[in-house]
Amino acid sequence: QVQLVESGGGLVQAGGSLRLSCAASGRTFGSSGMGWFRQAPGKQREFVAAVSWSGDSTVYADSVKGRFTCSGDNAKKTVSLQMSSLKHEDTAVYYCAARAPPFGGVSSRDYEYVYWGQGTQVTVSS
């Protein structure tokens, strides 16, 4: 079993930056691919970024490529999402998710993630 807790959300002006963190617990975390998804009001949940368990591979949604950086630290059992040049359309609840081990690769498909955090709100004022 893996538990995920996100932190770091908040209110920021357009053009600003925020760093989200996801703390994981559970002995099998070290072999899980991790991802970030977001859901804006009235919209479907969408993929944002993912990182492999080794940290060697990342993948990003086109809408955030070049602005967001996803990284993982297996020793600390944390995954981070550094968000820069934020836009109003980045406003959403951001969720951290983990794939079931031994699936340690990257994936943009939400159905491939079995563990989810409660989410953290990110609001970007224009």
Image (cartoon, rainbow, N blue to C red):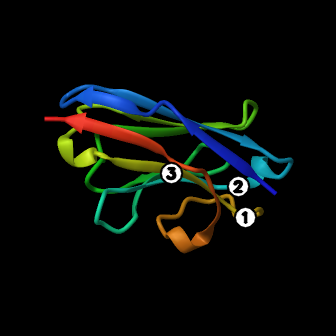
Q: Report the amino acid beneath label 1.
A: Ala
Q: Residue at x 28, y 45 (%)?
A: 91
Residue 100 numbered tag = 1
Q: Quadrant of residue 10 in the image?
A: top left
Side (left or right) of 92 relative to 126: right
Q: Nearer the viewer, mark 2 or mark 3?
A: 3
Q: Nearer the viewer, mark 3 or mark 1?
A: 3
Q: SS at mark 3? A: strand
- The kind of residue on which mark 3 rests is Tyr
How far is disc 2 from disc 1 in space, using C-alphas?
6 Å
- Distance from the alpha carbon under mark 2 to that under mark 3: 16 Å
Q: Are marks 2 and 3 in contact (CB under 8 Å)?
A: no
74 sits to left or right of 116: right
For the residues marked 3 and 1, what is the alpha-carbon distance in whole angstroms? 16 Å
Question: Residue lying farthest left?
Answer: 126
The mark found on residue 95 in the picture is: 3
